[in-house]
Image: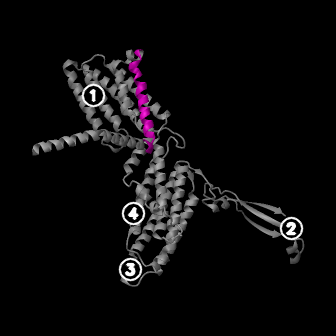
């Protein structure tokens, strides 16, 4: 009786699962579709890249579909399809890197393979396999060892791998066939066709440039630091004018900076070197300078974790002590944040705003001196009070370190801007004193003397304006300043 009851329960459960299967299947499919849609919307370039690979495969398949092409290349057309599959990369630099590595490695390895076969045949039928074995061992081992060198590993690792594969296949297969030249020609030509199609599609059909990705990544990370620094002021000093509802989220924008992204940045910089000049980027753009700037940005972001800990800490210093250092700390965070924004804008627009950046950094340093003075004046006398202000002193010290890193980032960007030929940009909104600096001239104004007495001199309706226009200084071979002043006299 009990067994029948268990059988009925199992049957009922099975029928219920069978009944619920269509709805669960529908929910699962809907969930997967939404996930795919979200994945595509996050970066539409992924969809475009998939279409580009499909287009390249379709074009290269013509080696099989078109009879004259098939008669010329035969089954070696498969090498073209294989080349498209392995060479197609997301970025133009990746495609060029793999395509050129594969083409040159195949060419060199094919030539050496044919030469090795002919050399081995000179040694007779018995000596041929021995010579081929020695050559395959020597070149294969040497090429494999070369892959351990950092420079070759970084830029030519794929080429070394294809060299080993191609040379071994040509040398070994040449032992059993007499048409070694025909095989080498067909494989090389089909690989060149497949690689060329991949490169052309990658460059001319919605190209994705690795250099632009690296450029935007570095600039956006600097903006995140600026937003976090400005948001810190409103959250640590709630009474300040910077307080807003979005402060809590902006102060933690630095968390989206991947502190372990060095490998990604190195990869993008390496691929960018393979890309031709495009848009704002010249042929020999200093891509390695981005790595130096990105390293400083990551080091600066680590200090923001300390600031975030100060914000979340339950230990609060006396309010009167905080009020004494609030103004210089607010100025430091505000000015350093503006400096970072100007640096990011300089990178994004490839324009120089060094005067604006230096002004904000100078203001931050002045605020640091005021902060140090306020700390000295407000330094507690008892150990108990000292323990209470330690978190605030830690926060102030961290702000000082951040300003130091902002200055280092600014110096690196200045050095980079010279190498990358940034255009000079005078933005009066960012640096109002800059536009006036070049318009002011030295001069004197005095009345025209029509008489000998002082009264006539003062009552004269005419004045003489002497304008001293400074000429650009020039330096001769003896480093002597030859700058001169041109004086213009106007009588009014």
Which numbered disc flags the more N-terminal residue, 1 or 2?
1
Give the image quarter of residue 454: bottom right
Q: CA distance from mark 1 to mark 3?
A: 74 Å
Residue 386's tag is 3
* Label 1 secondary element: helix
Mark 4 vs 2, N-terminal side: 4
Question: Residues at badges 4 and 3 in contact (C-beta under 8 Å)?
Answer: no
Q: Of the residues under marks 1 and 3, which one precedes in the sequence?
A: 1
Name which residue lies at 82% across and 62% down: 490
Q: Is residue 54 magenta?
A: yes
What's the CA distance linking mark 4 and mark 2?
A: 67 Å
For residue 168, the mark is: 1
Mark 4 and mark 1 lie on one chain; the one further toward the N terminus is 1
Q: Residue 184 placed where, x, y %? A: 34, 22
Quadrant of the rendered image containing residue 174: top left
Q: Residue at x 20, y 22 (%)?
A: 127
Q: Which residue is mark 4?
A: 305
Q: Is residue 128 visible?
A: yes
Secondary structure at numbered mark 3: helix
Q: Which mark is residue 72?
A: none
Magenta highlight range:
40-67
Q: CA distance from mark 1 to mark 2?
A: 96 Å
- The spot of residue 351 in percent (x, y) is 57, 51
**Helix, strand or loop status at disc 2:** loop
What secondary structure predominates along the stretch shown in magenta? Answer: helix
| 328 over 479 or under it: above or below | below
Query: In the rendering, which numbered label is found on residue 462?
Result: 2
The reply to whether the magenta stretch includes residue 464 is no
């Amino acid at each position: 009786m009990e067994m029948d009851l268990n059988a009925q329960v199992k049957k009922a459960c099975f029928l219920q699962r069978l009944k619920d299967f269509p709805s669960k299947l529908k929910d699962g499919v809907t969930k997967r579709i939404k996930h795919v849609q979200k994945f595509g919307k996050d970066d539409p370039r992924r969809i475009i890249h998939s279409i580009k690979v499909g287009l390249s495969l379709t074009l290269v398949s013509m080696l099989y579909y078109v009879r004259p092409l098939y008669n010329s290349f035969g089954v070696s057309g498969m090498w073209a399809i294989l080349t498209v599959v392995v060479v197609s990369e997301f970025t133009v630099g990746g495609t060029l890197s793999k395509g050129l590595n594969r083409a040159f490695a195949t060419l060199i390895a094919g030539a050496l393979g044919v030469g090795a076969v002919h050399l081995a045949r000179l040694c007779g039928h018995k000596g041929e396999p021995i010579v081929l074995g020695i050559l395959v061992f020597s070149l294969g081992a040497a090429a494999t060892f070369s892959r351990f060198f950092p420079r070759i590993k970084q830029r030519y690792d794929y080429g070394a791998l294809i060299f080993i594969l191609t040379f071994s296949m040509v040398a070994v297969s040449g032992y059993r066939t007499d048409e070694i030249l025909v095989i080498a020609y067909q494989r090389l030509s089909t690989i060149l066709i497949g690689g060329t199609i991949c490169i052309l599609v990658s460059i001319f059909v919605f190209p994705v440039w690795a250099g632009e990705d690296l450029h935007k990544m570095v600039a956006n990370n600097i903006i995140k630091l600026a937003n976090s620094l400005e948001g810190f002021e409103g959250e640590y000093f709630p009474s300040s004018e910077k307080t807003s509802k979005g402060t809590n989220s902006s102060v933690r924008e630095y968390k989206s900076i991947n502190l372990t992204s060095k490998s990604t940045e190195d990869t993008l910089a390496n691929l960018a070197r393979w890309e031709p000049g495009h848009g704002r980027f010249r042929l020999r753009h200093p891509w390695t300078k981005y790595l130096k700037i990105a390293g400083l940005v990551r080091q600066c972001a680590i200090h923001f974790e300390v600031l975030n800990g100060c914000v979340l800490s339950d230990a609060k210093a006396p309010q009167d002590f905080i009020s004494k250092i609030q103004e210089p700390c607010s100025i430091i965070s505000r000015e350093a944040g503006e400096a970072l924004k100007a640096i990011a804008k300089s990178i994004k627009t490839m324009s120089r705003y060094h005067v604006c950046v230096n002004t904000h950094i100078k203001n931050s340093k002045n605020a640091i001196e005021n902060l140090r003075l306020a700390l000295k004046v407000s330094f507690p006398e008892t150990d108990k009070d000292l323990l209470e202000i330690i978190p605030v002193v830690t926060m102030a010290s961290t702000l000082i370190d951040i300003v130091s890193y902002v200055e280092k980032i600014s110096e690196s960007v200045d050095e980079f801007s010279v190498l990358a030929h940034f255009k000079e940009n005078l933005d009066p909104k960012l640096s109002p004193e800059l536009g006036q600096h070049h318009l002011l001239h030295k001069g004197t104004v005095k009345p025209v003397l029509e008489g000998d007495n002082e009264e006539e001199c003062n009552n004269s309706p005419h004045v003489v304006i002497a304008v001293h226009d400074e000429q650009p200084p020039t330096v001769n071979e003896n480093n002597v300043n030859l700058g001169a002043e041109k004086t213009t006299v106007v009588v009014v």
